[in-house]
Amino acid sequence: LQAALGLHQLPRVDAYHARREQIWSAYDAAFADLPAGRRIGLPAPQEPDTLHARHLYSVMVDEETSGITRDGFLMAMTRQGIGVGVHYLSLPEHPYYQQRLGWRPEDFPHAARLGRATVSLPISARLTDGDVGDVVLAVRRCLGVE
């Protein structure tokens, strides 16, 4: 079943990737000039000689650098009609790893911090330029920049 679905999507792979590249670039440009105290962590630059799928535009919403908590950001985006992806807890915070391996979240503070701050913005190839503009405006409003 999945192969049948995949075969049907193959003719659009390159066009969808190109569109996600455009959206990615628009986000990068829109958030590059955020003032201190209102910044979100942007995705790392693409490594040379690689092809990035551009399937997730994940940002870090840290209260100290953005002025808002991740959960506050999520609620504010939702109130503006923008769906965002919530990333899950870091591995040391999952009960399985705690019980099976004896991991404790406090032993991995950086992983816990990153897991609690990561959010993905919409990056579907089906987003219109207007949709992308709506996402950018909503993010900037959440950060108190607009």
Image (tube, rainbow, N blue to C red):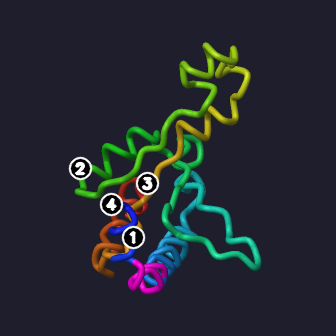
Residue 79 bears which disc, if any? 2
The amino acid at mark 2 is Arg
Q: How many marks?
A: 4
| Quarter of image, res 71 | top left
Residue 143 bears which disc, if any? 3
Highlighted magenta segment, given as a residue range: 10-17
Q: Tell me residue 132's x, y (percent).
A: 35, 73
Q: Is residue 9 left or right of residue 67?
A: left
* Mark 4 vs 3: CB contact within 8 A: no
Q: Tell me residue 59's x, y (percent).
A: 53, 55
Nearest to the observer: residue 80 or residue 126:
126
Q: CA distance from mark 2 to mark 1?
A: 34 Å
Nearest to the observer: residue 89 or residue 119:
89
The amino acid at mark 3 is Leu
Asked if residue 16 lies in the magenta stretch, the reply is yes
Mark 1 or 4, nearer chain start: 4
Asked if residue 130 lies in the magenta stretch, the reply is no
* Mark 2 vs 4: CB contact within 8 A: no
Mark 3 or 2, nearer chain start: 2
Q: Is residue 109 above or below residue 114?
A: above
> Judging from the image, what secondary structure is the residue with disc 3 in?
loop
Q: Which residue is painted at 74% across and 71% down in the image?
A: 47
Q: Is residue 12 above or below residue 102?
A: below
Q: Residue under circle 4?
A: 1
Q: Nearer the viewer, mark 4 or mark 3?
A: 4
Mark 2 or 4, nearer chain start: 4
Residue 6 bears which disc, if any? 1
| Quarter of image, res 34 | bottom right
